[in-house]
Image (tube, rainbow, N blue to C red):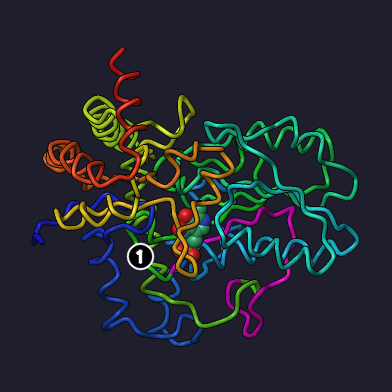
Amino acid sequence: MTDKIIYLDNNATTKVDEKVFEEMVPYLKDEYANPSSMYDFAKKSSDAIKEARVKVRDFVNAANEKEILFTSCGTESANTAIRGALAMNKGKRHIITTMIEHPCVLNVYKMLEKQGYKVDYIKVNSNGELDLEQLSEAINDDTALVSVMFANNETGVINPVKKISEIIKSKNPNTKFFVDGVQAAGKIPIDVQENGIDMLGISGHKFHAPKGVGALYVNSKTIITPLIIGGHQERGKRAGTENVPYIVGIGKAAELAMDNLEYEMTEVKRLRDKLEDGILKNVFNARLNTGIANRVPNTTNIGFEYVEGELILLHLSDLGICASSGSACTSGSLEPSHVLRAMNVPFTAIHGSIRFSLSKFTTEKDIDYVNSVIPGVIERIRNLSPYQEELAELKRRKSL
Ligand code: PLP
């Protein structure tokens, strides 16, 4: 065990930026008025929400700040968009999504299937790239919604959302397009107008705001029914007294993320590539699960063949390194992730796949340290593997 923390799990959640925290503090202490109240004391709270809405508008390049709703998280944004848009289009019963969406999207479609919707799930290739031909062929007159994530949380692979919106508009201009933008926000530029997106969800805790606040863009041509019904807040689209400090937080985080994009796409990418190259060079049974796919700059997903991912995570944790595996531990059995399964990651690597996700707070020293300890960690685990013959054969083939 160690006191040192090397945090490489930024796709799970991020550290709150000090500047975000400072901006929030007045609204957690002295500026506690309900923003809907009439007296002057409430003006600072309602103005702070207005300012945050403009910042999020600019972050996603929406045409108007009225197209931004504040929510509690990415999951609520997705649920509101999907269920809200379908409820306004009751005649249509067909939905298209992908096999690699986050559970906050996939499980909504599973529920809708039980309610009689037909859902098509678009495949990906071995790099995690979508089959656009299948998507194009699936769109028909009954298609109410196409729902595709901007970037995948496990692999970082970016989907070609502009191309997808063009396909949708050419096949059925009445079909709505929802994009789960949670893993793209803060990592690559997001432009909802340029990309023809009708609805886009983001989550504050993925780009250095606290957990418990998200946002949903709904363009002016798309009408949704609210998921949460009550007061008139958020123009009647999301009831409940606004979480002023957290809304201020996501606004500030959006502003900072825009300023940081260049750094993310150069420096964070350089460190990610350094980590990846170091592992692939020094660990003979490591493979990059995404091949040459276009990815967000902070994520790498590496399969360590013939070793257990959970064992790697435990060894890394002892060294203070936080990463994540593609497996979900369900009822005592280790099920590989639905994303890696959809990509047909070979059996030999799927159980030993690890996601490392960096942020602007990751340092060169962090990466040098991880690169220096990983070969030893993998070797120790490999020595316990029941697949010694296969490993020897793999080593022989790699050295040829
Ligand atoms: N969508 C994606 C792609 C995610 O990675 C996540 C969280 O991991 C979510 C949605 C859900 O976001 P939240 O945790 O804010 O509900």
Residue 330: tell me if it is visible: yes
* Spot occupied by residue 177 in the image (x, y as percentages of width and height): 70, 48
Residue 54: tell me if it is visible: no
Task: Say if the magenta span includes residue 343.
Answer: no
Image side of residue 177 versus residue 375, left or right: right
Element type where label 1 sits in the image: helix
The quadrant in which the N terminus is found is bottom left
Observer-nearest residue: 54 or 162? 162
- Residue at position x 63%, y 66% in the image: 79
The residue type indicated by label 1 comes to: Gly
- Residue at position x 31%, y 57% in the image: 14
Image side of residue 194 versus residue 278, left or right: right
User: Magenta segment range?
Assistant: 213-234
Image side of residue 337 versus residue 315, left or right: right
Q: Which residue is mark 1?
A: 249
Residue extending furthest toward the front = 389
* Spot occupied by residue 400 in the image (x, y as percentages of width and height): 31, 12
- Tally the marks: 1
Q: Quadrant of residue 368?
A: top left
Observer-nearest residue: 363 or 162? 363
- Residue at position x 45%, y 41% in the image: 155
* Spot occupied by residue 219 in the image (x, y as percentages of width and height): 66, 53
Q: Report crowding for label 1: few under 14, some 14 to 19, many 20 or more residues within 10 A (C-alpha).
A: many
Task: Say if the magenta span includes residue 221.
Answer: yes
Is the residue 360 above or below the residue 37 in the image?
above
* Spot occupied by residue 290 in the image (x, y as percentages of width and height): 46, 32
